Each structure stands twice: as C-alpha cells, then as structure tokens.
Image: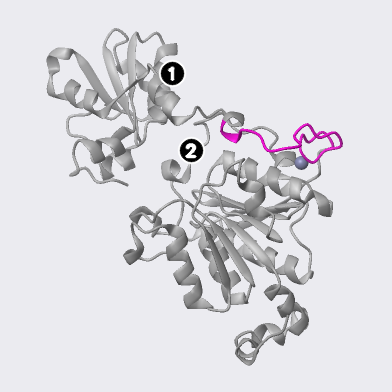
C-alpha cells in the first residue's frame, strides 16, 4: 500500500501528526468500511471518511432522496430528490476524494444478505434508524467478529459507542437485551430531530473508525457516550459485557441470524394491511367528513405544533399527550375515527379510549400523511 504524490499532498495534515504519520495513513487507505444507511448519520460518516482517505467505502441504502431528508442528510442536494441515495452519495463522495473506492449497495439489509454484505469489510458503522436493522447489524457483526461503530439520534439527544465483543467489549444486546414494544419509541419521522445532531454523532463515529484503523487512542469500546444538544452536555456510561447475552455471552443461543422484524414485534406489511380491524382508510375518513349522517366524528390526536403545520379542515384537535386528562370531553357512545401523522399514535389513542369503555373507535391508517397523498395535496406533508 503506497501513497502517490497527490495523496501525500492531500493527506499532509494527517502525515505530520505523529499519531497518524505515513504508516497510519497507509492503514486508513487499507481499511474497508461498510456504512449501513446513507442518511443523517451516514452523511457525515461517509464524507469525513472519504476526505480522510479511507480505502473502500461500502454504502447500504435502498431508499431514494426525499425533501424531508435535506435538513440533515448533507450527502444529498436539492437536485438529488427522487434519486437513489447510494447514487447521490457516490457522486458526493467522489467529488470530495476520487481516490476512494465507493461500493453502492442499493438494497435493504436483511438476514439473508447481511453476512455477505459485511464480510468483505473491516469495520461496520451503524447509521440506521430502526430497531430490526440495529439488532440485525449487531448480531451479524458479533458473528463475523467485526467492530460495530454505533450511533443513534432522537430529537436533541444522541449516543455513540463501539460494540466489539471480540475486542473485550459488550455488544448492542448487552446494553439493550429487548427491543422496545413496537410504536413505543417514536422514529425521527414521528418525533423529529435537530438537523445538526446527526452531524455531531456521525463525526464521533467517523473519529472512532479512524482510530480503529490506525490502532491509536482509547476507543469507545465498553463506553456509551451520550450527548444532549439542548443542554450542550456530554455524559459517559461504562458498559459491561453481559455473560448471559444471547449472542456474545458465554452460552449464546443466537448462533445465526434470525427474523428481526418478528423479534421487534413488527407485523409484516401485507398481513398488517389485511389483518387490522381497528384501522380505516383515508377514503373512509373522507366519507365520514363529507356525510354527517354517518354519525362519525374525526379527531386529530397530534400535537398543537403539528396541527399548525398542517390539518384537515373541520377536524378538532385532542393531542395524545392530553388525552388522559381530557378524554371525558368525548362521548363513549359516539363513533370516532382518530388520525395522527402516520397512524401509530392514533392506534395508541384508540387503545387508551377502548380501555375507558369507548364502544366504537377506529384509527386512520397512514394518518394525515396519507390524506395529503391520496385525498388533498393542498395539505402539506412534513
Ligand atoms: Zn452481547
């Protein structure tokens, strides 16, 4: 592994650092990193690793660029909306450093392909936004003995660590043995996220990767770094390996990849579409609003800030966060359709009202987002 004249000039600020030097820069060039997710975290990770001269950068993402991504996913530009994220990312990365070998994987990572995707790389970096993929990435990395550089973000808070049982540290399951019940932890799409936050957490992940590549410094193995952007505070937790861990413990029960959607309690999409008798469509909601004789009241259970951004005319607001105190404003013998942004919180509201003895409550599948797409495009999507 040699550096040409262009590379020596490009990486000169690394080469004069005694901790990196020519030997370290060659190690960076010899390192292959697989980045799972080309979104908020994947953007700074991929861009800084490329700038730093990582040799090979794989990027797994099956999604296309959406306008709502641009507030934080700086790999992609306004002109990229609608394009596959891997394609847009490859262009951006080559624009920064043409020496990097970019390997786009325009697929969803699954239990079937994860081991083959990960095997050719030295380090894996978790830039995912959902629990099934996070557990899948963890288990595949433990089985293949690859360091898993973890980061996650929500609203104003982020966390980062390096999971590597083969280096003496814990894995993600040692920290979180059980996934949260589905729908209990909102995604960034439901709960929001400060645009800069993935930049900070992603840069911490990129830093850990470079340190692993050159073998210098103290890594985040065995430590969880927590950052609160609103308070401008970092905290640190010591993590220990759990000897009972089902994947990295002394008597592992998970020795091959499992069904992670099922593990996280997520019902497969086609079955969910057929099976949930608690849901109605936005077309049903329109009928209820158009025809008062049906005797169905539609209620919006989102928060006031969201109502201000977008709402359906004539639909009253009763936020889920206030439902416990205010449900007596509703009549338990009346028929209700509840809607939220995408249909998760309205199901929670439905379950609560049913416990209070409400006889007829349905949740509008897809929420106001589906309303905007299928009924009235004048209602903005957010
Ligand atoms: Zn473990």
Q: Which mark is residue 186?
A: 2
Please say whether residue 231 is visible from this viewpoint: yes
**Residue placed most toward the observer, 103 or 319:** 103
Residue depicted at x 25% and y 29% = 282
Residue 221 lies in the magenta stretch: no
Q: Which residues are magenta?
A: 243-261
Count of picture labels: 2
Residue 5, above or below 50: below
Disc 2 beta carbon < 8 A from ligand 1? no
Disc 1 beta carbon < 8 A from ligand 1? no
Whole-angstrom CA distance, mark 1 to mark 2, is 17 Å
Locate residue 214 relative to residue 234 in the image: left or right. right
Q: Which residue is mark 1?
A: 351
Residue depicted at x 82% and y 33% = 244
Please tell me how crowded label 1 is: few (under 14), some (14-19), or many (20+) other residues with Cα within 10 Å.
Answer: some
Locate residue 374 relative to residue 18 in the image: left or right. left
Residue 259 lies in the magenta stretch: yes
Quarter occupied by the N terminus: bottom right
Q: Which mark is residue 21?
A: none
Dominant SS of magenta comes to loop
Q: Quadrant of residue 255?
A: top right
Measured from the top left, where is residue 283 in percent x and y?
Answer: 22, 27
At mark 2, the secondary structure is loop
Measured from the top left, where is residue 138 in percent x and y?
Answer: 68, 45
Locate residue 149 relative to residue 305 in the image: left or right. right
């Amino acid at each position: 592994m040699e550096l040409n004249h262009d590379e020596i000039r490009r990486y000169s600020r690394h080469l004069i650092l005694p901790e990196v030097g020519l030997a370290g820069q060659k190690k960076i060039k010899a390192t292959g990193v697989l980045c799972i997710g080309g979104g908020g975290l994947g953007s700074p990770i991929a861009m800084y690793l490329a700038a730093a001269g990582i040799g090979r950068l794989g990027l797994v993402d099956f999604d296309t660029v959406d306008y709502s991504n641009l507030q934080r996913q700086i790999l992609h530009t306004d002109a990229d909306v609608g394009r596959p994220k891997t394609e847009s990312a490859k262009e951006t990365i080559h624009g920064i450093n043409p020496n990097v070998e970019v390997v786009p994987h325009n697929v969803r990572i699954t239990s079937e392909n994860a081991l083959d995707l990960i095997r050719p790389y030295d380090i894996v970096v978790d830039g995912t936004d959902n629990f099934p993929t996070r557990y899948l990435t963890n288990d595949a990395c433990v089985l293949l003995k690859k360091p898993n550089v973890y980061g996650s973000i929500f609203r104003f808070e982020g966390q980062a660590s390096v999971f590597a049982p083969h280096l003496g540290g814990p894995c993600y399951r040692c920290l979180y043995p059980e996934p949260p019940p589905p729908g209990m932890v909102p995604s960034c799409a439901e709960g929001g996220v400060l645009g800069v936050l993935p930049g900070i957490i992603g840069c911490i992940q990129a830093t850990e990767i470079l340190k692993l590549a050159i073998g210098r410094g103290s890594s985040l193995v065995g430590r969880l770094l927590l950052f609160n952007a609103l308070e401008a505070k970092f905290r640190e937790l010591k993590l220990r390996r759990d000897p009972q861990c089902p994947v990295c413990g002394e008597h592992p029960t998970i020795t091959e990849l499992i069904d992670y959607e099922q593990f996280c309690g997520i019902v497969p999409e086609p079955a969910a579409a057929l099976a949930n008798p608690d849901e109605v469509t936005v077309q049903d909601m329109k009928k209820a609003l158009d025809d008062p004789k049906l005797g169905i009241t539609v209620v919006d259970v989102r928060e006031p800030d969201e109502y201000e951004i977008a709402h359906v005319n004539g639909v009253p607001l009763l936020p889920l966060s206030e439902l416990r105190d205010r449900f007596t404003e509703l009549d338990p013998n009346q028929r209700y359709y509840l809607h939220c942004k995408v249909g998760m919180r309205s199901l929670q509201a439905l379950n609560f009202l049913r416990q209070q003895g409400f006889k007829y409550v349905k949740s509008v599948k897809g929420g106001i987002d589906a309303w905007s797409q299928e009924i009235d495009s004048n209602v903005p999507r957010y």
